[in-house]
């Protein structure tokens, strides 16, 4: 009888081992499918990111070129206004308005910021360049603002107070 019990126990252990083997096999199969799905999603997301980065990079390059052109035009405008103001100031009868003085200083700062941005871009690695896009757009907004402001000065000069007092 002991032999029959051992045979029954052995048979049950074989059944349990077979069940465990089937469960392990099924779990491995499901994990394989899960792994494939995760890999597919990862590849898809990586492709999306690379397209977005590429688009940002291409957009950034064109934004940078536009900024350079617009800043060049603004700098030319500032140079012309500076020359006009300096000629008038040489007479001693007029002086530049504070608004004009501040505007010229702000344009100069923006030009320096652009030079610093260009240096930064040259030093950055390709994959970091899309982070610069926000700075480029902010500077472009400032160029537009300064250009518009220059069109609406209510005159560039004031009569010099010393000159007015001397003639009184």
Image (cartoon, rainbow, N blue to C red):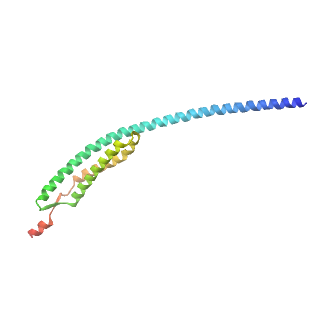
Say which residue appears at 35% left-offset and 40% top-offset.
Answer: 59
Residue 144 visible, this angle:
no
Q: Is residue 86 above or below residue 21?
A: below
Residue furthest bottom in the image: 168
| Quarter of the image where one finds residue 167 | bottom left
- Rendered-image quadrant of the C terminus: bottom left
Residue 126 visible, this angle:
yes
Q: Is residue 124 above or below residue 109?
A: above
Q: Is residue 100 above or below residue 66?
A: below
Residue furthest front in the image: 123
Residue furthest right in the image: 1
Q: Is residue 63 above or below residue 15?
A: below
Say which residue appears at 28% left-offset and 53% top-offset.
Answer: 109
Q: Residue 41, how many percent across, how many down?
A: 52, 35
| Quarter of the image where one finds residue 124 | top left
Q: Residue 82, how many percent across, how many down?
A: 18, 53
Q: Nearer the viewer, residue 88 or 147?
A: 88
Left or right of 15 in this view: 31: left
Q: Residue 58, how many percent across, how many down?
A: 36, 38
Say which residue appears at 80% left-offset and 31% top-offset.
Answer: 12
Left or right of 8 in this view: 20: left
- Rendered-image quadrant of the N terminus: top right
Q: Residue 26, how many percent across, how many down?
A: 66, 31
Left or right of 143 in this view: 31: right
The count of marks equals 0
Left or right of 27 in this view: 136: left
């Amino acid at each position: 009888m002991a032999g029959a019990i051992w045979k029954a126990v052995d048979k049950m252990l074989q059944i349990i081992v077979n069940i465990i083997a089937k469960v392990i096999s099924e779990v491995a199969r499901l994990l394989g499918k899960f792994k494939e799905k995760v890999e597919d999603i990862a590849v898809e997301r990586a492709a999306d990111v690379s397209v977005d980065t590429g688009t940002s990079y291409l957009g950034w390059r064109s934004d940078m070129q536009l900024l350079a052109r617009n800043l060049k035009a603004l700098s030319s405008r500032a140079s012309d206004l500076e020359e006009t103001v300096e000629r008038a100031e040489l007479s001693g009868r007029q002086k530049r308005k504070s608004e004009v003085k501040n505007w010229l200083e702000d344009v100069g700062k923006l030009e320096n910021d652009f030079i610093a941005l260009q240096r930064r871009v040259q030093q950055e690695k390709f994959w970091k360049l899309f982070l610069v896009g926000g700075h480029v757009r902010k500077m472009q907004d400032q160029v537009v603002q300064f250009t518009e402001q220059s069109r609406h000065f209510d005159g560039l000069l004031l009569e010099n107070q010393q000159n007015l007092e001397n003639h009184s």
